[in-house]
Amino acid sequence: MVYSPMDALHLAREHPQRDVVFFAIGFETTAPSTALTVLQAEREGIQNFYLLSHHVLVIPALEALLANPDLQLDGFIGPGHVSMVIGSNPYHRIATHYHKPIVISGFEPLDILQSIWMLLKQRVETRCQVENQYTRLVQPGGNGVALEAMGRVFAVRDRFAWRGLGEIPNSGLKLRSEYAAFDAEVKFSLPNVQVADHPACQCGDILKGVLKPWQCKVFGTACTPETPIGTCMVSSEGACAAYYKYGRGAPFQRSAPVTQPIRV
Amino acid sequence: MDLRTQTNATLHPLFAAMQQPQPNHHRLRDRTITLAHGSGGKAMRDLIEDVFVRQFDHPVLSQLEDQASFDLAGLAALGDRLAFTTDSYVVDPLFFPGGDIGQLAVTGTVNDLAVSGATPLYLTCSVILEEGFGVDTLRRVVQSMKAAAEEAGVAIVTGDTKVVPRGAADQLFINTAGIGIIRAGVTCSAASLQPGDGVILNGEIGNHGAAILIGRGDLALETSIESDCQALNGLVDAILAVCPSVRAMRDATRGGLATVLNEFAQSSQVGIHLQAEAIPVRQEVRGLCELLGLDPLYLANEGKLVVVVPGDQVETVVAAMRSHPAGQQARRIGEVVAAPVGGVVLQTAFGTGRIVDRLVGDQLPRIC
């Protein structure tokens, strides 16, 4: 098990006779440490370390959701760790162009509660702004060192395939040609196998807010955390996994819809 | 030289020495374990006698029979039922902050007996060794087993040794089975919880799981976290002395506190409400969990006792536990309620309830 891409580089250093491929995943949260690892490998002249980059970008993904005519969302809780890297400025288009409120949030329960309260307040006051609840870590301009490393090492792909959402333009990162020596896609021939989403899975509709997890045909029956069919159930952070864990047979009454605006 | 014509009086000194009875001094001089140590021959006999029998030093074991035998009347005087359990230990690394696989192999099985209300008496020691394993390391583990057994007041009375080829096992696996005698009148069972009962815990959770994680060295973190590895039979004695009507006891090992409470709630068809603020977690463990996205409620412990007693007995039991070294931080952490049936709900500091479900997978590989 490796805990960081630097561990993979360490493996490559320890086993010079073998090829080590790091499968790099994640949003802008993890991309900077991958970028710094490539720069370190270059400095050390390591020749058996390769990267298969599946890093993705949050803003194009949000825009793809927002551009979808089926979208049923009223606002967004913005991702805290991604925003620590990219800052709060890149979200402004969501507020100005798509007219949705967004609150960048921390991860502790109280952070989330406060962010929901801030979103509701925007709704009640009919505002659409980018607000930052996670001010203890997120700056408007993000983390300059991280962004600089990403910019040096990565280029944006024309398109990238997402589970549940299909192809999204400009939403993935690949290694720049200057770093082709570390690019697993260049070094090895990849079979380019396409694995289609399961036809019964409705993750796409859940991500767009069209369906609630329990309205999916396979939620809690064929699709459970033990036997996940789609992305929303695979990760403990997915909407379906959260509903499955905390919502099923809940001891708490599901509260009635709010009929009156909350005065704050 | 014609041996046939020689009499005893004229025997060559070399043959005279060979005819002397050999003193029973088996010494293992090898530095590493080889397949010969599992072959049933002299090398195996040396290993067993020198490393295990000499260290454990018990008259029943020293007879080297294929089984240990006990006088039934002596056992029956201690209670009215036999408790019998087994557990295998595969922890990686073998030595970790606060303990090692040998100590764990004794305390783990002792605890499994103790939580039934039994007085643990005898353990077995069955080891599977990987070819190439260091004999000195094995001696350290066996010494540690002996020390833990003495401290817990149990005897290791029979065992087995197998050696497997390199790669067929990871260094050393230990299985210990144990027997104990359950006191008359004590009926601890996960299925006997009733609404109104109190849930008591003897101290900080997650220390063992965190110590193992740090001990592997993959994280390159330095902390002062030590495993809580300890025998709980003394603490159980203290509890039963003041409250023979204990509903249920469990040591919260793999799967942590959350898993034990879920098992209780489901077996008894009741709910359990926990107070988050009452559950002690070390600052370092909390920090490690935050870093890695783990939940201390699910981290393994090796010396944490969860006790459920009738509501009116909670204070008495907590006081009794606090008078024992293994229970100084004992406190009430929650209570048994009628609903949600089979569910555990954590009442958070800011007034919400969080469902504490069973884990789907394991948070960590090979922790005990």
Image (cartoon, rainbow, N blue to C red):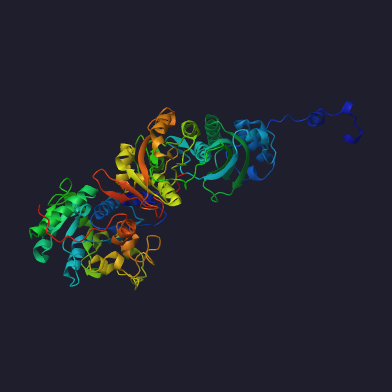
Res. B305 in view: yes
Q: Quadrant of residue A129?
A: bottom left
Q: Position of residue A72 (x, y in %)?
A: 19, 67
Q: Position of residue B41 (x, y in %)?
A: 69, 42
Res. A163 in view: no
Residue B125 relative to residue B351: left or right = right
Instruction: Tally the marks.
Output: 0
User: Residue at point 40% right, 63% down?
Assistant: A227
- As drawn, the residue found furthest toward the right would be B5
Q: Quadrant of residue A17?
A: bottom left
Residue B36 vertical placement versus A67 (above, below): above
Nearest the camera: A58 or B154? B154
Q: Position of residue B320 (x, y in %)?
A: 43, 30
Residue B93 relative to residue B77: left or right = left
Nearest the camera: B62 or B344? B344
Residue A173 vertical placement versus B43 (above, below): below
Nearest the camera: A105 or A155? A105
Q: Quadrant of residue A221?
A: bottom left
Q: Position of residue B182 (x, y in %)?
A: 56, 38
Residue A117 relative to residue B167: left or right = left
- As drawn, the residue found furthest toward the top would be B9
Nearest the camera: B160 or B2? B160
